Amino acid sequence: MDRTETLAALRRGDLAGARELRLPDGLTEVPPEVFALADTLEVLDLGRGSLTDLPADLARLRNLRVLFASGNPFPRLPPVLGDCPSLSQLGFRGCGMEAVPAESLPRDLRWLTLTDNRIETLPAVIGERQRLQKLMLAGNRIAALPDSLSAADNLELIRLACNRLDALPSWLMRLPRLAWIAYAGNPAEPATEPTPAARVPWAELEVGALLGEGASGRVHRAIWRGEAVALKLFKGAMTSDGLPAREMEACLAAGTHPALTGALGRLDGHPDGAEGLLLRLLPPHWRVLAGPPSLASCSRDIYHPDLRLDPARALRIARSVAEAAAHLHGRGLLHGDLYAHNTLWEAATGAAVLSDFGAASALPEGPDGTALARIEARAMGILIGELLDGCDVPPENLRALEIACTQPDPAQRPSLTEVAAALAQMTA
């Protein structure tokens, strides 16, 4: 059933007992028939329309956990959201929103997406939302984070790219569970010089089949000078991680490494002016290690239930990713999205490469750079733990490394160079 048919069925009363409702674009108001689902509705997607507010009695949807309203021109996050007793995930991306009232944040808030708005400040009460796990703020006008977030002990992922932060607060790098951070495009990010790269004329390419598509662009198979390559064409729009232009620069600055999908050159002369990169093409039997997080898992990847790993393959995957991340740190880059869903692997051998630089940021020198790198050590520890969960006989020394990487005091975690060295010793 498409979204238009869903709306018609809702109005006929055919959706009694529905737990999820995804309405079509173009709404000017929330259909009153939605409230007939008050006893069951858990996920509501309002589509992209012209909504500027929500019904004052929205809390009648007492089981509503997830609300998406991106692309509607809300001037502020609706205060009525704070009255909804079960609401834990909000998606208000690209709304032109300027204000986030304190009363708009639900008590059990877990995942808040406010990407690509005009927000300058966040209310201090956000630090009181103890379940907050994922905070998406890229593409706003935020100059300072509330100090109350220093108490956000469950915060695991934060996206701050393309704001107005002159500095990252010191408490941010001490949060015990933070594992994924992106802050490119802020004054706080160290300035870097553009990386020299080969220019690849569009006319020299034979562009073939679409291999995949993500938030920042589409990847095609292509032939360049007789060799098969991957061509990533960027969309140019703000993503949840930041601007694609920053992803391009990070991918070029990363240089070459066996466990990275390295850039071969920058595209020139696309007929529509699109920007693009040529990347190393992996063999067709390589696959993504896991799927991205779901609404329920929030910040944790989704693995195929049948995935089983022997210790040798688990160790090889972990070593490849750790070596890739250590290489990036050595080149002054934080990956920011070190995840299994950004890891491509060969099932037969466990060979793996780390991909996707959409959340990458430049690392400052000195203690701040070290502290940020220790955040990524936690992400590595989480990945190791997930690999161990897929092992029939988990290696005990690998479990000890997971514990070291995920300990709550970031300063006590090993560097990715130390992690890579430990994994190399285990696989010797």
Image (tube, rainbow, N blue to C red):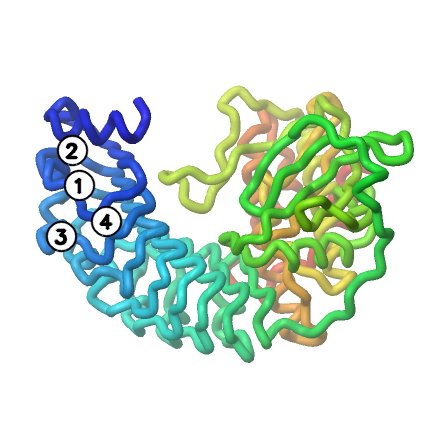
- Residue depth check, mark 2 versus mark 3: number of the one nearer the observer: 3
The three-letter amino acid code for the residue at tag 4 is: Leu
Give the residue type at disc 3. Answer: Pro
Viewer can see residue 44: yes
- Specify the label residue 243 is tagged with: none
Query: Of label 4 and label 1, which has the lower sequence position?
Result: 1
Circle nearer the N terminus (2, 4): 2
Tell me if residue 121 comes above or below residue 268 in the rendering: below
* Contact between labelled residues 2 and 1, with CB atoms less than 8 Å apart: yes
Residue 331, position as x, y percentages in the image: 78, 61
User: Label 1: few (<14), some or many (≥20) within 10 Å?
Assistant: some
- Helix, strand or loop at label 2? It is loop
The residue at the point 38 percent across, 64 percent down is: 152
Where is the N terminus found, in terms of image quarters?
A: top left
* Element under disc 4: loop
Cα gap from disc 2 to disc 4, whole angstroms:
13 Å
Which residue is tagged 3? 55
Quarter-wise, where is residue 384 in the image? top right
Q: Are marks 4 and 3 in contact (CB under 8 Å)?
A: no
Give the numbered dot on residue 87.
Answer: 4
Badge 3 marks a residue whose secondary structure is loop
SS of the residue at dot 1?
A: loop
Residue that mark 2 sits on: 40
Image coordinates of residue 309 in percent, x first then y, are 63, 25
Residue at numbered disc 1: 63
**Residue 359 screen position, x and y as percent:** 59, 55
